[in-house]
Image (cartoon, helix red, strand yellow):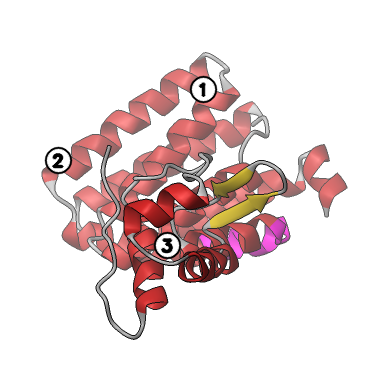
Amino acid sequence: MKRISAPRRTASLSAQLVDSLRSHIEAGGWPVGTRIPPEQALIEELGVGRSTLREAVGALVHLGLLEPRAGDGTYVRSSSELQSVMVRRASSAQRDKVLELRTVLEEYASGAAALRRSEGQLQQMRELLADADAATAGEDTSAATSVDALFHRAVVRASGNDLLVEVYDYLGAALTSSLGGLPWDAAHAGEHARLHRRLVDAIEARDAAGARDTAAAIVRLTRDHETRTPRAAEEQ
């Protein structure tokens, strides 16, 4: 099991311990959903005082990385404070606002992907399109939603902007949860597939403007689909 880095002995010991524990969580040392070791075990492992440890753990709770549960210890809530804040905010937002955010992220990412994508990344997009077609043909809504999320993440990764990739990955679960799972009628499903193929064609041709326009069109289609679906109307 990977060990946590003990903090250096300086005046800001608790601040260093926060950084050390945060890095341990981000690296997967304590996976999301698991309970962290008992307080006494951490004190002995790290060689710090009880008050220093409690201060550090309290800071991580405030950041949204840890969650205390009465009578059951402390659990890892998120692997990043940015993820915790953004997912919580997106999950509580109106669908229309989430769609606007998705437009901003994907429109820019698609244009950048057209200029920076590799052949391997382009091939991955083509393969995901084939997987999406297969899921749609099999009327597997859950699989189609999952593949669609993977496709858009692949486009964002091809943008070459690491910060954008990080933000989009953190929001991915919230976007999929908020926008996915609704059945598509034949007309919308066909147009959805056509626009995705057009997006990949634009990225392959290194047509940044065309890629941005198509990405925006995909989100507009999703918005139209949302407004025509009974469940979406009920949640407005």
Q: Nearer the viewer, mark 2 or mark 3?
A: 3
Q: Sort mark 1 into few (<14), some (14-19) or many (20+) by Cα contacts within 10 Å.
A: many
Q: What residue lies at 24% left-to-right and 36% top-to-bottom?
A: 124
Q: Secondary structure at mark 1?
A: helix
Residue receiving disc 3: 167
Residue hosting label 1: 136
Crowding at mark 3 (Cα within 10 Å: few <14, some 14-19, many 20+)? some
Residue type at mark 1: give it: Thr
Q: Residue at x 59, y 25 (%)?
A: 141
Mark 2 vs mark 3, CA separation in Å: 23 Å
Measured Cα–Cα span from mark 1 to mark 3? 28 Å
Judge from the rendering whether residue 48 lies leftward or rightward of residue 175; answer left or right: left
* Quadrant placement of the C terminus: bottom right
The residues colored magenta run 92-102
Query: Which is in the foreground here, disc 2 or disc 1?
Result: 2
Residue located beneath label 2 in the image = 120
11 in relation to 169, above or below: below
> Which of the two labelled residues, at mark 2 and mark 1, occupies the earlier sequence position?
2
Q: Is residue 177 visible?
A: yes
